[in-house]
Amino acid sequence: MDLKEKKWWPYVEKGIKSLFVEAFTLMEFAKESDQKFGDYAFVVFPAAKGYEGLLKKVFLDLGFITKEDFFGKRFRIGKALNPSLEKAFRHESVYDQLVDHCNGKEIADKLWQTWRLCRNLVFHWFPNEKNSLDLDEAKDRLEMILSAIDSLFAECKIN
């Protein structure tokens, strides 16, 4: 995977780029290794973190969040992207702004599903649920993250 060919690659700062590179480096290591792991979530973590950073930058640049949100410790992507956010917290929603800016729910829903499947369900542990990833699932999650970013940059006006 040549990330440098991605339309959005020049937009991303060095620290976020290194997270994506690290994820693909870990994927290559895992594929070539004789060591087998019960959970390959560690492959997805850097890309999920990079996804979070990229989304925050996009949201800041589009005026959806403030500099205080961007640099602060309280803004939560999962809350902001959640299409089911309660009305009392809807003022914190980025989802609605994405729907307006990107001419429909498709991109907003894709970003939300990617966040949910590639960050929350990979990172969190829940009793009685298998949240571990095999190698193919980890690869699919990496591809899902890239696909969501590709769609965001293809369909929405981002400077």
Image (cartoon, rainbow, N blue to C red):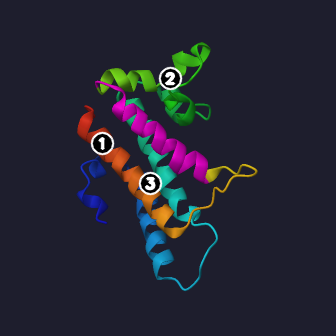
Q: Which residue is mark 3?
A: 15
Label 2 or label 3, whichever lies nearer to me, is: 2
Query: In the image, residue 83 lies at what x, y percent?
Result: 50, 26
Label 1 or label 3, whichever lies nearer to me, is: 1
Q: Residue at x 62, y 52 (%)?
A: 123
Tell me the amino acid under the disc marked 3: Gly
Q: CA distance from mark 2 to mark 1?
A: 20 Å
State the image quarter where residue 105 is shown. top left
Tell me the amino acid under the disc marked 2: Ser
Q: Relative to 116, does residue 128 appear above or below in the rendering?
A: below
Tell me the amino acid under the disc marked 1: Ser
Name the outermost residue toward the bottom: 34
Q: Residue at x 59, y 79 (%)?
A: 36
Q: Which residue is mark 2?
A: 93
Query: In the image, residue 148 lies at what x, y percent?
Result: 37, 45
Q: Residue at x 72, y 49 (%)?
A: 126
Magenta stretch, main secondary structure class:
helix
Query: In the image, residue 69 lies at what x, y percent?
Result: 53, 29
Residue 59 visible from this viewpoint: yes
Q: Which residues are magenta?
A: 103-122
Nearest to N terminus: mark 1 or mark 3 = 3
Nearest to N terminus: mark 2 or mark 3 = 3
Q: Nearer the viewer, residue 63 or 32?
A: 32
Q: CA distance from mark 2 to mark 3?
A: 26 Å
Helix, strand or loop under label 1: helix
Query: In the image, residue 5 lies at what x, y percent?
Result: 23, 58
Q: Are marks 1 and 3 in contact (CB under 8 Å)?
A: no
Quadrant of the rendering where the C terminus is positioned: top left
Q: Which residue is mark 1?
A: 151
Q: Relative to 159, does residue 66 appear above or below in the rendering?
A: above
